[in-house]
Image (cartoon, rainbow, N blue to C red):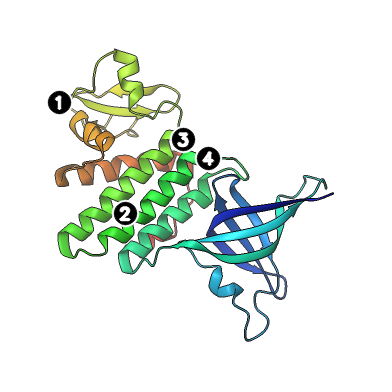
Amino acid sequence: MPETIQQHAFVLHRRPYRESSALVTFFSQENGKFNGIVRSVRTGKKNNKLALLQPFQRLELVWQKTHKSSESDLIAIRQIDSGDLRFPLQQTANICGLYANELLYRLLYSQHEVPSIYRAYQHLLYELLKVQQFSGEPYQQGLQIALRQFEYQLLCELQPGFDLAAIQGQSGEAILTEQGYYYQPEMGWQFAPDKHDRFTDGEFNKVSGRCLVALQQGHIPADCLAALKRFMRQNLAILLGNKPLNTRKLFT
């Protein structure tokens, strides 16, 4: 007998599917990223499914788990309702949220549980909503801080040894604030040469220990934001490959 599954999930991406359905990529705490078919999305004047399938609102989904072939990861969503959380992001905060959605859509494996990233994603949405009460420089800095913290949590999950706790594990000491560091896949955190911002292979940027400590503690000063943005972008590029992110175009 099929098992009925009920979960909360956010929409990461959707596109038309056949005549009246939508192929939707959801993100839940229990299933991580997964693909579902929502039928009868574009039929009927009173159909509100399309209005529900918007980003930044937590939905209640119901489907039935069967024991059919696992060749396809598509789930037929039986019921979809508005949940208890909605984040009405606007302007640049909305673009930041879409950027996070694209990262999750591109980088996560299908149906791989990642509760730490799910919590980081919800925290990001809360922070983006909170900074909308500001304007000017505090608004822009608040957005940047929220994104850098989310990117850090994402890289901690996807890149072995990226967690800054690994630095203390290697040296047995705290992060040296005056020392430069860089991260190299499969090798972990390394001390950076003092005289060069870039290294012989031209690939790795360094970042100061002072900025890494600020990132770890969640209180990033304004003079660290540009360096951390460059550093996170370079490390995410290793995972993203050559295909650029569409949402980065929106920032310009």
Q: Quadrant of residue 176?
A: top left
Q: Which residue does the image show at 30% across and 29% down from the upper left?
A: 182
Q: Secondary structure at mark 3?
A: helix
Q: Residues within 10 Å of mark 4 (few under 14, many from 20)?
A: many
N-terminal-most mark, 3 or 2? 2
Amino acid type at image mark 1: Glu
Q: Nearer the viewer, residue 58 or 93?
A: 58
Q: Are marks 4 and 3 in contact (CB under 8 Å)?
A: yes
Alpha carbons under labels 4 and 3: distance apart = 8 Å
**Residue 118 can be seen, yes or no:** yes
Residue at the spot of label 1? 178
N-terminal-most mark, 1 or 3? 3
Q: How many marks?
A: 4
Q: Quadrant of residue 163?
A: top left
Residue at the spot of label 2? 127
| Nearest-to-viewer mark from 2 and 1 | 2
Alpha carbons under labels 4 and 1: distance apart = 34 Å
Alpha carbons under labels 2 and 4: distance apart = 20 Å
Amino acid type at image mark 4: Val
